[in-house]
Amino acid sequence: MRIEQYIENKKRKHDGPICAYVYDLGQLRKHVDTLKSSLPDFCRLFYAVKANPDPRILGTLATMVDGFEVASGGELKKVPHNNPVLFGAPAKKQAEIEEAIDAGVEAINVESFHDLNRIEWLSKQKDVVTPILIRVNLSRDVPESHHMMSGVPTQFGVDERDVPEILKKALQMNHVSVQGFHFHAMSNNLNAEAHMQFVAMCLEKAKSWRNHFGLEIRTVDIGGGIGINYWDPDVGFEWDTFASGLHQLEAQMDGLSLVLELGRFMTAAAGSYVTEVLDVKANHDHHFALIRGGSHHLRLPAAWKMSHPFRIHPVEGWGAPYERPGMKKAEVTIAGELCTPNDVLVKSEYVEELRAGDVVIFDYAGAYAWTISHHEFLSHPEPEFIYLDEKK
Ligand SMILES: Cc1ncc(COP(=O)(O)O)c(C=O)c1O
């Protein structure tokens, strides 16, 4: 089944107004397969659960990725059993650290001296040695990215200048073992060459600390941060350029493995938010289309103050005995059902025609979409969740 078929079925049954997240698990499988097969053997592809923790998505990825990155005890519980897990979070609760140790995660990120002391102490109580990665906030930033988490003052990681000191401390401890470094630094980077420069910089830093302190590390985790061009989806991040850049690092890896923790780039294109237009009107000489749904289901465009990419599925036939509202050949703002002017998904974009009863499909809604939205606001019904799967 395709999205269009789902819409037609709903319309035929008069089962509206339509409001759904549609996840294409077949597309997800193909995409991840392409990503994995293009990477060199020294790379391990992890999925960042925060991007979309939907159980069917996690279940689909479980047999494809090399592991999962989690940022809370809640996410840890959602990961399908027997998958490698990396646990990192800036504000860890004691219970979460214990859960991560008990679950036997591959490593826990250390984000501060306090983090290190707590992990050492809790591991001692349990009489275990816990593998750790030192999460570093690099001194240099990464140009052209959104939401900097490194290279600028943030709550994330250990200041690069403090890395030698935290390593000295960790090396004196008996219940933690330094397995490598974690460098997640940005979000939505669209420039493959800049991303490669970042990776090369991370590798150099990790190797210089390894050599200086005689560490027996095995992991350089570059995090996620590869972007989706919501403004012009046809001109996206050049994955092939990035993957061939990674292949060129082969000779410099010295037995280290490079972990990628992709969130957005893994699942964004596998999800669409599909909503029906309830009304179309003009106000202060501007057209507005109001949809069943809004930013309480898809908060991303409001959060980033952008128009989300959309396409219109025209629905012919209007059963009502009164006039069908609509507009033609003009700019429209597509707004949701909330009582706030911030509930806007598309701002002043040109359309040929849009009418009540038509359906708007917002693609690239498989990551940081439903999961980051304020579902309870105004107590509207939640969307349906539909899973398309080419195998069925
Ligand atoms: C530590 C860490 N790893 C990976 C990711 C995934 O990033 P993205 O979805 O940009 O690939 C995030 C996102 O914030 C993160 O904080």
Image (tube, grey):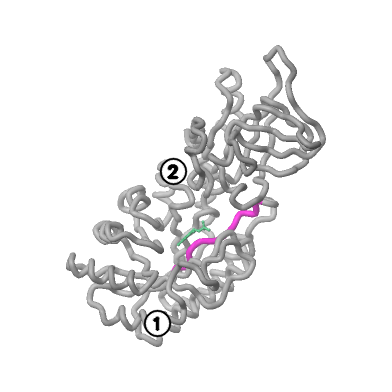
Q: Position of residue 2 (x, y in %)?
A: 58, 33
Mark 2, Cα crowd under 10 Å, few <14 / some 14-19 / many 20+, is some
In the depicted view, which residue is nearer to us: 75 or 86? 75
Residue 192 visible at all: yes
Q: In the figure, 321 relative to 216: above or below?
A: above
Residue that appears at 40% across and 83% down: 164
Q: CA distance from mark 2 to mark 1?
A: 38 Å
What residue sits right under mark 1 in the picture? Answer: 210
Label at residue 375:
none
- Describe the element under mark 2 as helix, strand or loop: loop
Q: Is mark 2 within 8 Å of ligand 1?
A: no
Query: In the figure, 85 relative to 54: above or below?
Result: below
Q: Quadrant of residue 107?
A: bottom left
Neighbours of disc 1 within 10 Å: few (<14), some (14-19), many (20+): some
Name the spot of residue 49 as percent of width and height, x first.
Answer: 43, 52
Which residue position is annotated with label 2?
54
- Residue visible at 57% across and 62% down? 147
Q: Amino acid at mark 1?
A: Arg
Which residues fall within the magenta stretch? 221-230
